[in-house]
Image (cartoon, rainbow, N blue to C red):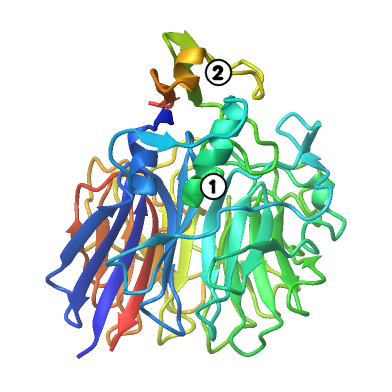
Amino acid sequence: MSKARVLVGTRKGAFVLTSDGKRKQWDVSGPHFAGWEIYHVKGSPADPDRLYASQTSGWFGQLIQRSDDGGKTWAPMDNKFVYDGVPGTHQWYDGTAHPWEFKRVWHLEPSLSDPDTVYAGVEDAALFKTTDGGRSWSELSGLREHGSGPRWQPGAGGMCLHTILLDPSNPDRIFIAISAAGAFRTDDGGKCWRPINQGLISQYIPDPNADVGHCVHRIAMHPSRPGVLFMQKHWDVMRSDDAGDSWREVSGNLPTDFGFVIDVHAHEPETIYVVPIKSDSEHYPPDGKLRVYRSRSGGNEWEALTNGLPQQDCYVNVLRDAMAVDRLDKCGIYFGTTGGQVYASSDAGDSWAPIVRDLPAVLSVEVQTLS
Amino acid sequence: MIRVVLPPHLRKLALVDGEVSLDVPGVVSQRSVLDALESRYPMLQGTIRDHVTLRRRAFLRFFACQEDLSHEPPDSALPDAVARGEEPLLVIGAIAGG
């Protein structure tokens, strides 16, 4: 029988939540790495027992942990993330040039086919890769050095590379996103990159239509249609039907188009989910009501999903890496909040229930569908 | 033997209980002690000092013999009591960050 395993990164440790295919009763394991910030935990699609975790601390820096048994035991791997060559400068908050400095790993994206190959998105923004299971990391410096790097600037949370999407139909094509630089694509395995931000409009930068400088919060794709991308930008929910070459807004009737997460139903490529957040200065749901919004038409027309979610006095946030979907039937949707709840729906969003209510603030949620 | 006391998170990472005892050849300095520590416990590389610059992480301090030695040059000799193994070098996580 199929199972679901949810990997949760929080401000004070990692948690592994497991359930059978019904997804009603959950076993909670953790905290792993208690007291450390766990920005992301993700399993290899090629070997579900191979997990990677980004463990970080303001005191002790960055660690990478690896599990070969589905999260029961872990071992520290190489934690040396050194920029290629002389890293140069990017823009600081005040517009001055600021040297590139490694701070932490935000996102780990294992290869679709090789458990030993993983991409790491880091702050200050760059993309690293290991091909030996985390024993060593090297930068794919073509991204940082393609030309626009000196114009990148940090968002409020830092200048982080937070999204890595691997094209299942083309191993040379990778999409990434950076706050606040925008989205980028390579078509040659990471050597050459170019911005893919045409159609994004951001009023908080001097040229709202600039090729870089956009605060992209998250990008999602359905694996069956890797040329169709959905984006939650700082403001605006966007869609591209040409692999990012152009974007159009699909915010439609959302109560607010600010937010962080966006994801796609596992079996319906036109069904997408967001969690609207009131504004960039008020990071909580509008009206104190935690609502997931679902569009079955790839955007523009949205319905509020509220069954089982708090509809009064709720002032949590849902961070950019904190939503995931499983591949069971019906599709399961999961998201975690800064209030420490992880909510799950086993019916594609029609109803919700908390798996756990009182974890530390949730930074990331991933789910594995296990047979 | 040089005695080093690590903060709890690093003891857990290095899988050690209590103090660490290290054989440190030559001058006993911050640098030589950390070199010996990281050689014996490679998982601590990058956690006390930066991989590239080798600078002490901002929220860590080095104490010994009731003195804060954090701002001493890394190659300065540590107090004789530390070199003789009578007193430990304390690696302290600063009370910062909430």
A214 on left or right of B48: right
- Measuring 58% from the left and 39% from the top, which residue is drawn there? B35
Most distant residue in the top direction: B66
Q: Can you identify the residue that label 2 sits on? A: B78
Residue A289: which numbered mark, if any? none
Q: In the rendered view, would you say A105 is above or below A73?
A: above
Please rate how many residues cluster around mark 1, counting C-alpha atoms within 10 Å: few if below 14, some from 14 to 19, many from 20: few
Q: Can see residue A298?
A: yes
Q: Is the residue under label 1 in contact with that under label 2 (CB below 8 Å)?
A: no
Q: Can you identify the residue that label 1 sits on? A: B39
A25 on left or right of A171: left
What kind of residue is marked 2? Leu
**Labels 2 and 1 share a subunit:** yes
Q: In the rendered view, would you say A119 is above or below A258?
A: below
**Image quarter (top left, top right, bottom left or bottom right) of the C terminus of chain A:** bottom left
- Measuring 32% from the left and 41% from the top, which residue is drawn there? A35
- Of helix, strand and loop, which one carries label 1? helix
Out of A308 and A266, give the one closest to the viewer.
A266
The percent position of residue B48, horizontal first and vertical second, equals 52, 35
- Measuring 33% from the left and 64% from the top, which residue is drawn there? A7
The percent position of residue B46, horizontal first and vertical second, equals 56, 43
**Image quarter (top left, top right, bottom left or bottom right) of the N terminus of chain A:** bottom left
- Marks 2 and 1 sit apart, C-alpha to C-alpha, by 19 Å
Q: In the rendered view, would you say A276 is above or below A205?
A: below
A369 on left or right of B27: left
Q: Chain of mark 2?
A: B
